[in-house]
Image (cartoon, helix red, strand yellow):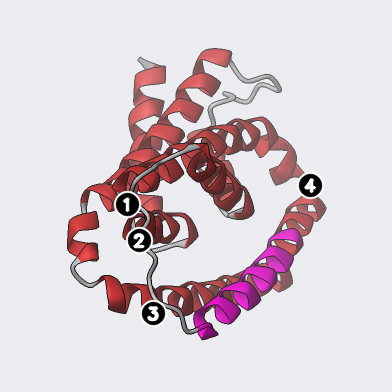
Amino acid sequence: MEETKLFLITYLAAFIGVVPPGLVNMTVAKTCVEKGKKNGLYVAIGAGIVILIQAFIAVLLAKYIFDHPFVRKMLLRAGLVVFCILAVYFFIQARHKRGIRHNRQKANANSIFKGMLIAALNVFPIPYFVAIAGAMDISGGEMEYPWSLIISFAAAACLGSFTSLYLYVVLFDKIEKKAESFAKYSNYFMAGLMLVLIVVALIRIFNT
């Protein structure tokens, strides 16, 4: 019963957390436009694999991170560096004037690795899942988490996130109708998103 309750709440929280445009889901949509729906699905699968790992890490580190503010601040600083690098990268990509290349004949493991890489660079899910784990108090005050709850939490986080990403793949047809404008502005949007995340990270660093 406790596992079911935890699964449903975590699934919903993970689903909602990925619905707003962000680094991973925009990458999925962008891949669908440029390389086809199947490659976009593979990116979502790769991202889901990493999110599963991130959820495991979040659960195992939840109590430690809450008890050690220094560790929390170091994670935010690491995220700040990553966001700065990504902001510069996407801005440079947006400045390049090039047409859309549609290559939809093959979908391969490269798209899965791409999804894993993008999800790994997106460090915000870890503190997000840490906050959820802390709010749910799945340890019950114990130093060791029951493995049944850990598995339930991680699986729900992964499936909830993947469901949201899959919606971006399903809605690809609507995105494709505006492929030219989407391709033109997506990199600018992602660069702007990185700037927002940089500001958020800075605020959190100075307020911890």
Q: Which residue is mark 1?
A: 36
Q: Give the residue type at disc 1.
A: Gly
* Badge 1 element: loop
Kindly check if marks 1 and 3 are in contact, taking CB atoms under 8 A apart as contact.
no
Q: Which residues are magenta?
A: 78-96
Q: Give the residue type at disc 2.
A: His
Inter-mark Cα distance, 4 to 3: 40 Å
- In front of the other: label 1 or label 3? 1
Residue shown at 22% from the left, 48% from the top: 170
Q: Which residue is mark 4?
A: 68
Q: Give the residue type at disc 3.
A: Tyr
From the image, which quarter does the N terminus lie in?
Answer: top left
Q: Earlier in the sequence, mark 1 or mark 3?
A: 1
Residue 124 visible: yes
Q: Earlier in the sequence, mark 2 or mark 4?
A: 4
Q: Camera-side residue: 171 or 76? A: 171
Inter-mark Cα distance, 2 to 1: 7 Å
Kindly check if marks 2 and 1 are in contact, taking CB atoms under 8 A apart as contact.
yes
- In front of the other: label 4 or label 3? 3
Q: Which residue is mark 3?
A: 185
Q: Is residue 96 above or below residue 53?
A: below
38 with respect to 45 (left or right): left
Label number found at residue 102? 2
Residue 118 place in picture, x, y as percent: 56, 52
- In front of the other: label 2 or label 3? 2
